[in-house]
Image (spheres, rainbow, N blue to C red):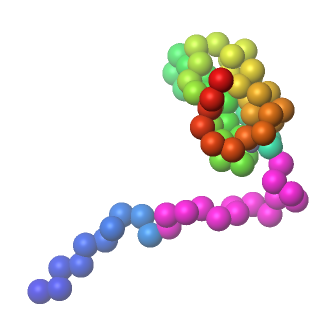
Amino acid sequence: MGAVLALGNVTGVAHQDDPAPGQQHLTTTVEQGRFCVARCACGWRGPARRARSLARADAEGHTAGGITGAAGA
Ligand SMILES: [Zn+2]
């Protein structure tokens, strides 16, 4: 009796991992196989690009423009 099934992750929402002084948008490009993805310290993540230049462009667009929500364009 008492079959306790864990619901996978207990920690669902990550809340402030680093004590960042005022939410900085620190973008980096991560290579995933043949693709390159732009990522940000705020949790934003760009689409997979075939070229790193495109991923960096996404990152620049993320830091430059207001970022809230999915990628529009
Ligand atoms: Zn960001």
Camera-nearest residue between 46 and 69: 69
Please name the residue shown 59% across and 19% down the image. Answer: 49
Question: Which quadrant would residue 19 be assigned to in this image?
Answer: bottom right
In-image side of 45 versus 1 (left or right): right
In-image side of 63 versus 37 (left or right): right
Question: Is 19 inside the magenta-drawn segment?
Answer: yes
Of all residues shown, which one is farthest toward the right?
A: 21
* Quarter placement of the N terminus: bottom left
Of all residues shown, which one is farthest toward the bottom?
A: 1
Q: Position of residue 23 (x, y in %)?
A: 81, 54
Q: Where is residue 26 in the image (x, y as percent from the top left)?
A: 79, 41
Question: Which quadrant would residue 64 be assigned to in this image?
Answer: top right
Please name the residue shown 44% across and 69% down the image. Answer: 10
Q: Position of residue 33 (x, y in %)?
A: 52, 21
Camera-nearest residue between 51 and 65: 65
Q: How many marks?
A: 0
42, above or below 12, in the image = above
Please name the residue shown 72% across and 15% down the image. Answer: 53
Question: Is 16 inside the magenta-drawn segment?
Answer: yes
Question: Which quadrant would residue 4 be assigned to in this image?
Answer: bottom left
Please name the residue shown 61% across and 22% down the image. Answer: 36
Q: Quadrant of ligand 1?
A: top right
Of all residues shown, which one is farthest toward the left?
A: 1
Q: In this orientation, does residue 31 appear?
A: no
* Quarter placement of the C terminus: top right
66, above or below 10, in the image = above
What is the span of residues highlighted in magenta in the rendered image? 11-24
Q: Where is residue 17 in the image (x, y as percent from the top left)?
A: 69, 61
60, above or below 54, in the image = below
Q: In this orientation, does residue 57 appear?
A: yes
Main SS of the magenta segment? loop
